[in-house]
Image (cartoon, grey):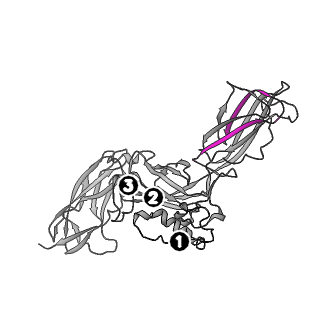
Amino acid sequence: MSSPYTGAQQPSPATHQLPAAQQNHSLAFRVMRLSRPSLRPDPAALLRFDPRDVFLPEDALTSPDPSAAVDFLQGLLHPPDSGAATTVPGDFTFRDRFLLHDTADALAPPGLLVLPQAFGAIYLGETFCSYISINNSSGLEAREVIIKAEIQTERQRILLLDTSKSPVESIRSGGRYDFIVEHDVKELGAHTLVCTALYNDGDAERKYLPQFFKFTVSNPLSVRTKVRTIKDTTYLEACIENHTKSNLYMDQVDFEPAQQWSATILEADEHPSVVKSTIRDLCKQPVLIRAAGGIYNYLYQLRPSSDEPGQMKTEGSSILGKFQITWRTNLGEPGRLQTQNIHSTPTPSKDVDLRAVKIPPVIFLERPFMVNLCLTNQTEKTVGPFEVFLAPSVSGEQKTVLVNGLQKLVLPLVEAFESINFDLSMVATQLGVQKISGITLYAVQERKHYEPLPDIEIFVDAE
């Protein structure tokens, strides 16, 4: 619990405030933020800790004869009737206590839990918890006290407490009325905690007391994303950076994909020596992102969740999903954030899509073979007819894989979001690794040539 706010603003005119000059109020608000303490070792106590200190008397190491401590511990661990003669190793003096022999020696057990001495930073996703006390510092009693507390932001006002229906009967001289308010911080920027009191003072005069306490909400972390699309698979990389002054332990970093996507997180393979068990999965340690700029990267693989070709063209299909992130600080204070929708990289849409579906595993020289192709209409209207042919090489080189038979294959109309499969007869003229290149689609009515199909490598064998 931190120290009270300071520098509250002067009361501003309000509907309940009397039109008189500045009033002398019997009551005043004091606000303290309820936050967890921090670990702060005592610099004077940074001596190396020895577990055997627990068993020794307080003056064992400061006595004129430190060897007495050895005899004392020897008798404690090995009584005379045990028959053990093992000596207890170690130096029981303070001369090497400033040397750190192990990382645990730097813990400084004498360190104390220290309450925050300042208001501290408030971050988005945290729960703002405040202890508010209205005290009567005058010599008169305040009666019928109506107390209100609310949070004001640039967008809204949130009421936290209102005692209008059950006013506080009285606050005697030197007394106080305490209460606690909580608010889940969901907006960035300036916030104002407004505390007001409407009461009767000792002269039976109705007075209105407003006090304002301002604070700023910052972003605890940032999420930077990169989207890469390879054929039908989309990869989403998320980099989470810690902007706070304390370590963040990520309890949950889940990507919630949009309806048309399914997501799988990609993680590095564990070392073979790591033993897998159900208990280990349940007790999995949270991911640590260190303070002041620490980062951690996540990689997700996204695939369309439906095989319907038209679904990916619906409005809003560029939305991939959003992240749900929860974390805790060093002493367990929770936080939670939800990102905005993440959009895929815009790609030029195609009216129709031509792709190779099946190629024979064995192809012989100068023997015809069939290449199975699929033409998909990705629009909401009927398209066609089309012609499929083998375009000549741009460089003028002679092709080694040619069309067998008719040089142009005519395709019928294709309904909206429908597909047709067809076979193209081809023949190879050279042995070895060859390429099928230049398969081109032509829209007859629109007189439009589409980009040729990517080259397909095949292996031509002799009979």
Instruction: Name the image quarter holding residue 59.
Output: bottom right
Disc 2 crowd, CA 10 A, few/some/many (<14, 14-19, 20+): some
Could you say which is closer to the camera, residue 108 or residue 161? 108
Considering only vertical position in the picture, is 436 above or below 27?
below
CB under 8 Å between discs 1 and 2: no
Q: Which residues are magenta?
A: 124-152
Instruction: Name the image quarter holding residue 32.
Output: top right
Q: Earlier in the sequence, mark 2 or mark 3?
A: 3
- Residue 101 disc label: 1
Residue at which label 3 appears: 280
Residue 37 x/y as whole percent: 62, 51
| Majority secondary structure of magenta residues | strand
Q: Is residue 126 found inside the magenta-colored segment of the image?
A: yes
Residue 281 x/y as whole percent: 38, 53
Residue pictured at 22% horizontal, 68% vertical: 402
Disc 3 crowd, CA 10 A, few/some/many (<14, 14-19, 20+): few
Is 276 left, or right, of 100 in this rendering? left
Q: CA distance from mark 1 to mark 3?
A: 31 Å
Residue 455 x/y as whole percent: 30, 67
Q: Earlier in the sequence, mark 1 or mark 3?
A: 1
Q: Is residue 10 found inside the magenta-colored segment of the image?
A: no
Foreground label between 1 and 2: 1
Q: Earlier in the sequence, mark 1 or mark 2?
A: 1
Residue at which label 2 appears: 298
